[in-house]
Image (tube, rainbow, N blue to C red):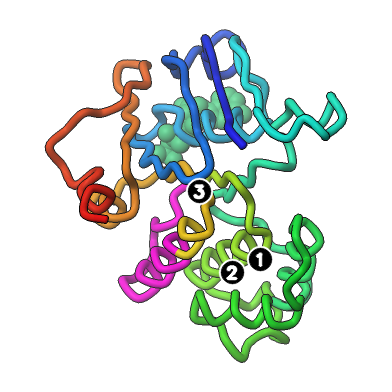
Amino acid sequence: MKLVASNLQVGYDDSKLIDCKPLQLAAGDSIHLQGANGSGKTTLLKCLAGLLPPLSGKITLESQPSLSWWRSRSPLGRVVYMHQSPYLYEGSLYKNLSFAWRQRQSQAASKQETIEQALALVGLEGRAQELAASLSGGERKRLALARIWVIQPKLALLDEPLANLDSHSQKLILQAITQLQKNGCGMIITSHQAEGLSHVCQRSWNIQDKRLEEQVSSSNYGRKQNAR
Ligand SMILES: Nc1ncnc2c1ncn2[C@@H]1O[C@H](COP(=O)(O)OP(=O)(O)OP(=O)(O)O)[C@@H](O)[C@H]1O
């Protein structure tokens, strides 16, 4: 599955935020999206997820031809977007992960085991019956990522998954991101913390002067990949 965008401009009404070169996100890609506050990172991710219309240009999903035409070309519902302040369902952690299970394509594994593994992955083991509303901000983000891990999407867009987290939570989030990558999930991650992400992302996109460019730098990007 591949998300392809051409001639893309994103923004609101007549206010253009970003002019993009042709973009592609395929399963297995990991891209760090950088830009100043207010440069339009969230807006771009929402457009790529099909949650907002772009000002101009085309976003399509290249995938299995077996799907009906109206599902096969739209990213909506098939590219998972994680909001920077994730919305959780009322009820328990287990209930939140059960909803995620319904969106999972392959249900060959056991639901119970998958949910337990997801909770353990983000350090919430043994807490399945607690109410999601009682979680701290950092724990909410960890549960949101556990939900994505249960879904096992081909493509995920993670908006500031590391923001406002202590080092323990950041470590758990990075661990869950690595697990998703091992399963072939392609992702774009926004973050102002370049250091944490340079080890898990192969590439970097940078928004500057309302333009999105692939950043060619001497940083760590690609080092991990090359070392494999
Ligand atoms: N629904 C909306 N209608 C009009 N303008 C909006 C809307 N949502 C966001 N904006 C504006 O668009 C600009 C870009 O916002 P966006 O959240 O995409 O930036 P960002 O790069 O993700 O910022 P940050 O790093 O602070 O999270 C901001 O100036 C914001 O006020």
Q: Residue 78: horizontal and vertical position, in percent? A: 70, 42
Would you place residue 223 above or below residue 33 in this image? below
Query: To which residue does mark 2 refer?
Result: 143
Instruction: Please tell me the numbered disc located at residue 158.
Output: 3
Q: Amino acid at mark 2?
A: Leu
Q: At 42% from the left edge and 62% from the top edge, which residue is drawn? A: 178
Q: Secondary structure at mark 3?
A: strand
Q: At 78% from the left edge and 73% from the top edge, which residue is drawn? A: 95
Query: To which residue does mark 1 refer?
Result: 150
Q: Secondary structure at mark 1?
A: helix
Q: Secondary structure at mark 2?
A: helix
Between the C-alphas of marks 1 and 3, the distance is 15 Å
Q: Residue 109: horizontal and vertical position, in percent? A: 73, 73
Residue 55 lies in quadrant: top right
Query: In the rendered view of the protein, which quadrant contains the C terminus?
Result: bottom left
**CB-based contact (under 8 Å), mark 3 and mark 2:** no
Comparing marks 1 and 2, which lies closer to the viewer?
Answer: 1
Give the mark nearest the N terminus, 1 or 3. 1
Instruction: Please say whether residue 162 is one of the residues in the magenta stretch.
Output: yes
Instruction: Please tell me the numbered disc located at residue 8.
Output: none
Q: Residue 61: horizontal and vertical position, in percent? A: 66, 29
Give the mark nearest the N terminus, 3 or 2. 2
Q: Is residue 29 left or right of residue 52?
A: left
Magenta stretch secondary structure, dominant = helix
In this picture, which residue range is highlighted in magenta? Answer: 159-178
Q: Amino acid at mark 1?
A: Val
